[in-house]
Amino acid sequence: MAVIPGGTEVWQARISRDLAAQLQADSEVLGLSGRTEIVKAALQLLHQRAAEERMARSVAEFYGDEEPPLPIGVVAEEPDDADAS
């Protein structure tokens, strides 16, 4: 990892040609142009997924064995009549 003046960093990874081809095709579907945009989008998704996981673990730790309450405005599902028989 190289540190560049101005508060940015360069990260590198070696990937297979197959994955590179798949990512290139994915980037076209998503309207991303170039490797930099692909890598930035992937890292943003990684960061978002980690934040979601941290939140889920925090909720699980806080409530322990108890069932967490539903968010405001969300109503618990009622069992269907077919499920009740």
Image (spheres, helix red, strand yellow):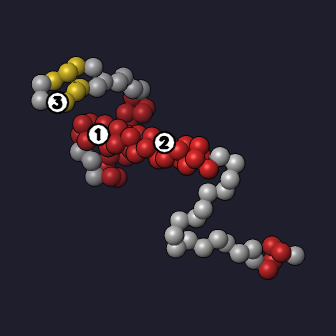
Label 1 element class:
helix
Label 3 is placed on what type of residue? Answer: Gly
Label 2 element class:
helix
- The residue to which callout 2 is attached is 54
Question: 70 above or below 3?
Answer: below
- The residue to which callout 1 is attached is 40
Please say if the residues under marks 2 and 1 sit with CB atoms less than 8 Å apart. Answer: no
Q: Is residue 48 left or right of residue 4?
A: right
Could you give the CA–CA distance between mark 3 and mark 1, rounded to whole angstroms? 16 Å
Residue 24 seen by the camera? no
- The residue to which callout 3 is attached is 7
Which residue, as the protein is rendered here, is positioned at the far top? 2
Q: Quadrant of the C terminus?
A: bottom right
Select label 3 or label 1 by which is in front.
3
Q: In the image shown, does 18 or 71 lie closer to the viewer?
A: 71
Residue 68 placement: quadrant: bottom right
Q: Is residue 29 left or right of residue 10?
A: right
